[in-house]
Image (spheres, rainbow, N blue to C red):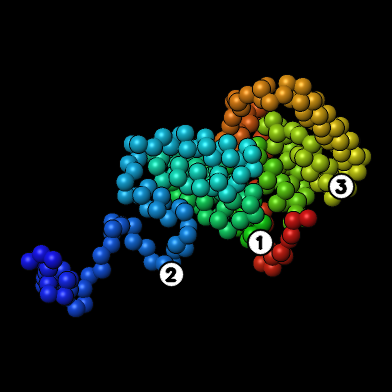
Amino acid sequence: MTDRDGEDGRHEFSEGEGFQDPYDEFDLDPPELGVDPGKVDPVDSRVVSDTLDAENIGSDDVDATELLDVGLNYMQINRYEQATDAFERTAQFADDDRLEQEAWVNKGVAHAELEEYDAAIGAHREALQIDGESEHAATAETNLAYALWEFGEISEALEHAERAVEIDERFAEGWFNRAFFLSERGLSEEALHCIDNAIRLGLRNAKVLEEKAEILEELGEYDEAEEIADEANEMRERAEQRVMEERQEMQGQGVAGAGTQQGQQSNTQPRHTPEDPTVDVTDPGPAPKDEDDREWQLE
């Protein structure tokens, strides 16, 4: 036993000044990572990364365009939840208003695919707050109209559908959506004008023709409706045949032939330009406002 040991063989540690009462707790984590466990799930793996995004990652260190592409790739494989995260981060780090707006519009589309229409409405409203007259504004308006319709806001949905074609009168999808909403409210003549505009502007596929056939039936034009329906069926059969042929080709090429996707486009609805720039687009005018609006449901 040495002289430095106490009589009982134990080392006498310095008592020091002790702790104050009460004392501050000691924590290795920086204060910016402190979270309220009542508000944040402690097992949520994104908590730390989301906090660090705002604190430690500068916008110059993130390529927002690449983030947008990541979201679009998720959309291609139907991973919509991951897509919404990617688009939200794109909007967070984008230093260009157009890119941020495109991210919000795509986020709204992804939420709609998940049938999260409340979130889709919010995303499209965010897009329109950035710029209500830009190249993406008409797309945001028509997608907002769709989300509102699914959410049960029928009258407001039609208002935004009308707003879409006011922003861009050559936006074919806007005219088609407006035709659909008008038809569902029993305004078949106005709906026919709108869907004809969509077709003139280059939007001609089986879905559009089937909708036009239904509108013609509502108007009592049964012969023309039958002709349009037959054309739609033929178009759908040709499309299904092409899909089958493409699948057979992919199976023949194997995994190595799959390659990367080229020419990928944003999930915002594509803009169609008619071949003839002199095409006449007619506007049936705004839908009449009924005091007692019936709540229509999508079939």
Q: Earlier in the sequence, mark 3 or mark 2?
A: 2
Q: Secondary structure at mark 3?
A: helix
- Residue 133 is tagged as none
Q: Nearer the viewer, mark 1 or mark 3?
A: 1
Q: CA distance from mark 3 to mark 2?
A: 58 Å
Quarter-of-image position of residue 223: top right
Extreme residue toward the front, this view: 1
State the residue at coordinates (74%, 59%).
297
The residue to which callout 2 is attached is 38
Q: Could you tell me which residue is drawn at 61 percent across and 44 percent down? A: 79
* Residue type of the residue flagged with mark 3: Glu
Left or right: residue 101 compared with residue 162: left
Q: Mark 3 highlights which residue?
A: 217
Nearest the eye: 150 or 138:
150
Q: Residue 78's spot in the image, x, y percent?
A: 64, 43
Nearest to viewer (mark 3 / mark 2): 2
Q: Is residue 78 visible?
A: yes
How many C-alpha atoms fall within 10 Å of the one at disc 2: few (<14), some, or many (≥20)?
Answer: few
Q: Amino acid at mark 2?
A: Gly
For the residue carrying disc 1, how many other residues have a C-alpha within 10 Å: few (<14), some (14-19), or many (20+)?
some
Residue drawn at (45%, 50%) of the image: 129
Q: Quadrant of the N terminus?
A: bottom left
1 or 3: tag closer to the N-terminus: 1
Q: Nearer the viewer, mark 2 or mark 1?
A: 2
- The tag on residue 152 is 1
